[in-house]
Image: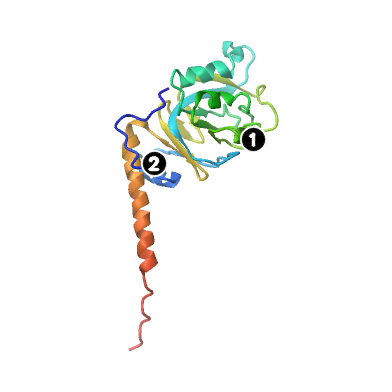
Amino acid sequence: MSQTAPPEIEWRGGWPAPRVEDHLRGVGRIHSHRAHILSLVSPAPRRLFGPVATIAYLPHRDDLPQTDLGFGALFHEAVGDSPAGTVLVLSSGGYPDASHGGGTKLSRIQNTGAAGVLADGRLRDFDQLAGYAFATWCRGEATRWGGATVMPFAANVPVEIGGVCVIPGDYVYADSSGAVVIPRASLQRVIDEALSVEAEDARSLEEIATETAPRPRTQG
């Protein structure tokens, strides 16, 4: 998975608009599909942005070749030869309350320079994850191992995350208010619209700051 945005993308200052809601409104001006992922938790909240690589989870079975494949092999297949800056997206496999990994397994993100992980399930070892340089967003902290409940099954396939369709190569932007999934082909347009939303809000703030209360009507 390529770690960089398409060459035509312009960040206008090095970063997209600063809020998920700006990007969501940007997507809404271009697309009609659902793009917002809600109710995410982080051990160390920080912004996450980058191109998506996916690992699809399924309910555990003990009779499939993928049963013993393991997370490591699928991780490296997902991020490919250029992992830096990639956002690893993990589907829930139907069990969002089960653990989908922990600090040891996800240390691969740190080692490869990937941007972070967005998991539609719980993760273990929040203290360890908080100490890494990458951003982590998930459904909450887990204490029990989840390998008997869900298993990583396939790399770089379309997945469903919180009711949103996520395709490898899409872009994800996440912060404390949630995440938005941006189709790669629309990235520049969405960023332009998001920055327009930000500018419109700034103008509204200035106008409100200088407005005066209307004079009360006199009884005639």
Q: Is residue 6 left or right of residue 146?
A: left
Q: Which residue is mark 2?
A: 16
Q: Quadrant of residue 9?
A: top left
Q: Quadrant of residue 43?
A: top right
Q: Residue at x 29, y 32 (%)?
A: 8
Is residue 30 at all visible to an observer of this figure?
Answer: no
Q: Which mark is residue 155?
A: none
Given the image, on which type of amino acid does mark 2 rest?
A: Pro
Vertical order, 64 against 162 (above or below) = above
The percent coordinates of residue 90 (x first, y second) are 53, 28
The percent coordinates of residue 83 (x first, y second) are 46, 23
Q: Nearer the viewer, residue 149 or 195?
A: 195
What element does badge 2 sit on?
loop
Q: Which mark is residue 126?
A: 1
Given the image, on which type of amino acid does mark 1 rest?
A: Phe
Q: Residue furthest left?
A: 8
Q: Quadrant of the C terminus?
A: bottom left
Q: Residue at x 36, y 76 (%)?
A: 214
Vertical order, 147 against 126 (above or below) = above
Q: Nearer the viewer, residue 157 or 20?
A: 20
What element does badge 1 sit on?
helix
Q: Quadrant of residue 209?
A: bottom left
Q: Residue furthest right?
A: 144
Q: Quadrant of the N terminus?
A: top left
Is residue 204 at all visible to an observer of this figure?
Answer: yes
Of the image marks 1 and 2, the number of the one nearer the N terminus: 2
